[in-house]
Image (spheres, helix red, strand yellow):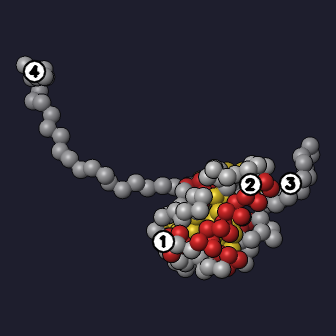
Amino acid sequence: MDNGMPTVLVPASALGVTGYETPGELEGNQQLAGRLQEVRSAAGRLMGLGDVEGTTVPKPTLLAPPRDGGAVMTRTFVPVRCHASTGVLGAASVAAGPFAPGGVAEGIAKLPGGPGAGGRVRVEHPTGYLDPDPDLDLDTGPGPGAVAVPGPVVRRTAVARTARRIFYGTVFPRPAGTAPVSPGA
């Protein structure tokens, strides 16, 4: 799936994990690291990226059923180190994944309103969630002058982000009519 970030969606259970492990637990699993590298290499070739050794894409993302009211639980790797949360573009790719008929997210993701309903797709990750809102064309049959495309076509994806306060301070303006003081004066 590439909806901003080439991503390999993998059911966590297919690699012998639950998808609910902590990033530290997953990073300590050497067998998993080897399997992830194999998956990345094969996916890189299939995506036309060639040899992906020494690159960070495609990013493997393990999928598990949601636990906190979202659509899907994720664990994302860069390239085989588990991300403490998830990247925005990776979450956008994950959010589009459940709409691919017969895709690996089918049966794992719980889409709000069911397939084709549209709307935000809450992507759970180790430290919280992101709410990408993919707009997909689910009718991908050939139209006038169009080429048939297997699976849905993403028209756009919106992601709302918030920021936490990182600074608080007080400003003391000069009294009206006073000149600024030069350094060294």
Observer-nearest of 162 and 63: 63
Q: Earlier in the sequence, mark 4 or mark 1?
A: 1
- In this view of the protein, can residue 84 be seen by the observer? yes
In the image, is residue 105 above or below residue 152? below
**SS state under label 4:** loop
**SS state under label 2:** helix
Q: Position of residue 91 (x, y in %)?
A: 59, 60
Q: Please state which of the two labelled residues, at mark 4 or mark 3, is closer to the viewer.
A: 4
Amino acid type indicated by mark 1:
Gly
57 with respect to 184 (left or right): right
151 with respect to 64 (left or right): right
Reading the image, the residue beneath label 2 is 44
Q: Which label is found at residue 184?
A: 4
Amino acid type indicated by mark 4:
Gly
- Dot 3 surroundings within 10 Å: few (below 14), some, or many (20 or more)? few
Q: Earlier in the sequence, mark 1 or mark 2?
A: 1
Q: Please state which of the two labelled residues, at mark 1 or mark 3, is closer to the viewer.
A: 1
Reading the image, the residue beneath label 1 is 24
Q: Earlier in the sequence, mark 2 or mark 4?
A: 2
Q: Residue at x 71, y 77 (%)?
A: 14
Q: Residue at x 68, y 69 (%)?
A: 35
Q: Earlier in the sequence, mark 4 or mark 3?
A: 3
Q: Residue at x 24, y 50 (%)?
A: 168
Reading the image, the residue beneath label 3 is 149
Q: Position of residue 148 (x, y in %)?
A: 90, 53
Amino acid type indicated by mark 3:
Val
Q: Position of residue 4 (x, y in %)?
A: 65, 50
